[in-house]
Image: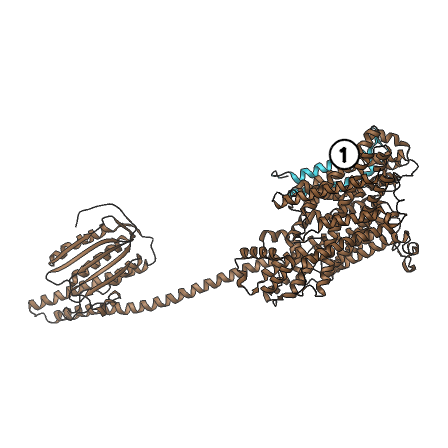
Chain colours: A brown, B cyan
Amino acid sequence: MHPSLLIFASIFYVAILFLVAYWAERRAKKGKSLVNNPYIYALSLAVYCTAWTYYGNVGRAATSGWGFLPIFLGPTIIAPLWMIVLKKIIIISKSQRINSIADFISSRYGKSIWLGVLATLISVFGIIPYISIQLKAIASTFDILISHSSHFNNFSHGPIYQDTALYIAIALVVFTVLFGTRHLDANERHEGLVAAIAFESVFKLVAFLTAGIFITFILHNGVGDIFEKASDLPIMEKLYDLEASGINGGTWFFLMVLSMMAIMFLPRQFHVSVVENTNSDFLKKASWLFPLYLFLINLFVLPIALSGLIQYPEGLVNPDTFVLSIPLDAGKDYLALFVALGGFSAATSMVIMAVIALSIMISNNLVLPLLIRSQTITNPYVFDVSKRLLGIRRVSIILVVLLAYGYFKSVGQGYTLVSIGLISFTAVAQFAPVILGGIFWKRGTKAGAFIGLSLGFLIWAFTLPLPTLAETGVIDDSFITNGIFGISILKPYALFGLEGFDHISHAVLWSLSLNFFGYYFGSLFSRQDPVEITQADYFVNVYKYRVSSQDFEVLRKKARISDLRNLTNRFLGEKRLETLFAVFEEKHGLKISELNIAPPELVNYIETNLAGSIGAASAKVIINSIAKEDPISLEEMFRVLEQTQEVIKYSKQLELKSAELEATTLQLKIANHKLKELDQLKAEFITTVTHELRTPITSIKSLGKILQTNPDLSETKKGEYLEIIVTESERLSRLVNQVLDLEKIQASDKDADGFEDIPFSELVRRSFLNLKQLMTDRNIRPGCRIMDAGMIIRGNYDQLTQVVVNLISNAIKFCPPVEGIIEVTLAVEGDNCVLKVSDNGVGIPPDQQEKIFEKFTQVSNQELGKPAGSGLGLFITKRIIENHKGSIEVSSRVNFGTTFKIILPLLKKESISFGEA
Amino acid sequence: MTNDRSYFIFGIFILAILIFNFPFLGIFGKGKALAGIPLLYWFFFIAWLLVIVGIALVTTVHRRKI
């Protein structure tokens, strides 16, 4: 095949990818997101299937039979658990703005910088071999298509400018930089990229199935036919009996466990499944769609492998290339080109995603924390940080791809795709204890995580990649047989004397178990600092926090608004700063511009959002450079020590209770005060009443005695005395009645229960009519004008009657003996009804007008002497009126008369009429 | 997610681990064939498909309390 055709086809394919990505981003901007659905999400997870799956599976099947399968059964088995494990990770990551697996680990363990650095190093060193096999696969396919030599390893002996892999590497760098680092997204989401990855997933599946169908059904007559033709091959024994192929239960199981961890914790898998996730409910569909994808892409692996073994029995063709070689040798050049593009898509999708995930980690968890520590970035005169971050990302992309290329040139060519891929799987499996422990075990500490990860990483490096360097002659290989420094228990393939396992199982066993115990006991023997405690509680109990939407900061940081503004501006840009502040203002009902010092909530909020761009650890350091921590109060100390939400809730309830108690105490105090006052009033009242009672009794008693001791008094004198006695007795009984009335009114003081709708006009008319006779008897000219017949008010009928009668009786009492006039008027004024009772009597002097409403006050008049009455009438009247929410006024001129005016709130008017009274 | 659902999730997880591992796998690995195709081939792909169907049922069935 001519190279230009191949180059043209590749460029055409890449152009399609760009179009897909561009289209997806345009739709995302319009709000019609393409990737916001479970199908695209499941397809993006299929970035798991790389050149390893596409080419390596067949190779593995051709050499070891079923050995290829556990890597795909593992993800299927763990898929149902995604609903529990991955969902929790997604929810935590969304709320904490976590954007890589290193960030997740660093965040969980107190936003530790060094854990972030360690996790980044494990990822980078662990994934580089994996990327290198993709380079190898792409380069090999190109060479095979061009030279049609069907040999995977013969292309690298030439000057470097003829090396296909180098050009592939450069092309991939350009492609990834263009795709992944166009702009700094606050949440590290790349819709276009995800769409392109999903497209690649479809493409590689279709291409592989096409190859499988062609080989199985066109070159041969179906699966049964292939098995029959292959029945003499030595491989067949392995397909009938797993144990005959050297696979024992342990190896099989370890491979499954490795793949279960890989599907969740490979940096690129974490990126597509967690960081790029838009809705955690997509996991429901993805947890069976993705296994279905794996099922389909594995369906034809064995038939292709057997077909290749039938076709090339001499073993001259590398089994890793069967997918491509068979169509090519069948003369189907275009089919071969299509299949090669499928492999190209499998490899590129992995490289792009892995390199982007790694570059985020390198910039956020490795470079940035170091830069910040060197203080250059917090310098206010430094240039635009977001541009600088992108620069760091680009450089790390180049670096990672170059390292992968270097590994490929020095090591990768001597191994199969699968054996190198498994080295990477074992590396990322080291994340399992700290992540799973991190989200389910609150007690896991930073120190424990550090010990566990370091142990796992060291043992991994010693038992897997180091020997590969030795075996390919990069370093001296004597330590493999003799142990390092000649210590026999430190042999990389038989560590601590453990023999009889294959290399991968051996490495998994040692690295994971020491990692786990290091983490476990390291946690038990260390303590958490306050940040760790809050983060641990948040990660483990994230659902509870989501329900109660509580803030979870312990350290109350404060910072100057201007500092915070400058910082946010530099890292996130002016536009995003304004949106963030606006959102915060709306949520908390604050005006940030009016503040000088930012409250802890705002500082926390900005820190979380910064973490979305630059990682939790870096964000913490940057915020700490401008923020001061409040000294932890006793209450907060309590929170830190007790850590659990239950305790916080309990103490809040206690606070509430004590507040309630305080309020009750206050009420009791007030009530007590009132009671004391009333007690004193009562004493005063009794004194006055007894005094008032004694006066008439004294006069009755003395007159009675006179009558008793002087039987011979004249009849006229007797009559005179008896009349006085009768009058005084009447006065006495009136006084007693009114005191009783007063008691009644005071008892029903606040009691509006007995109130009913009262026809007030009618009430006034009746009261007036009852007293009319009395007035005419005393030569008084009575007048009554009721302006509206239908006035209704709410009140007590008897009490109101008493009020009207009291006022009219008073008027009668003070009317002059001749030409007395009493005028009663009732009218509506606004929402009130107003009753006026006027007389033309003696009047009340201005200095007395205030006092008449007090108890036992009577206006004494030199001419009339002490008037008849108890002095309680007006007091009772006023109390009744006040109970009815009304008011009473008096206006008077001495010798011209007095007018009492009562204002009561009107309930409604009814149109009733009755004749003028 | 109902609690019942998480029981089913764990159930299918444990079941899948058991059937895809030794010693269970040994049952199908004794040189037998069906229609010229090794029994293991049949077993792996049929069981795999059944597990996928099982996951789909457990994770996507709504409303009804499973």
In depth, the one of A518 and A455 nearer the eye is A455
Counting the numbered discs, the total is 1
Amino acid type assigned to the residue bearing label 1 in the image: Ile
Q: For numbered disc 1, what is the local secondary structure?
A: helix
**Could you say where residue A480 lies in the image, as x and y percent from the top left?**
91, 54
Q: A588 left or right of A488?
A: left
Q: In this figure, which residue is indicated by the disc labeled 1?
A: B46
Does residue A19 show up?
Answer: yes
Where is A563 relative to A580, above or below? below
**Could you say where residue B34 lies in the image, as x and y percent from the top left?**
82, 29
Q: A706 left or right of A266?
A: left
Where is A271 relative to A841, above or below? above
Dividing the image into 4 quarters, which one contains the N terminus of chain A?
top right
In depth, the one of A911 and A184 nearer the eye is A184
Please, which chain is the residue tagged with disc 1 on? B
Does residue B9 show up?
Answer: no
Where is A394 relative to A722, above or below? above
Within 10 Å of disc 1 (Cα), the crowding (few <14, some 14-19, many 20+) is: few
**Could you say where residue A675 lies in the image, as x and y percent from the top left?**
37, 65
**Residue A375 picture quarter:** bottom right
Residue visible at 25% across and 51% down? A760
Q: A20 left or right of A158?
A: left
**Could you say where residue A538 lies in the image, as x and y percent from the top left?**
64, 55
In depth, the one of A37 and A634 nearer the eye is A37
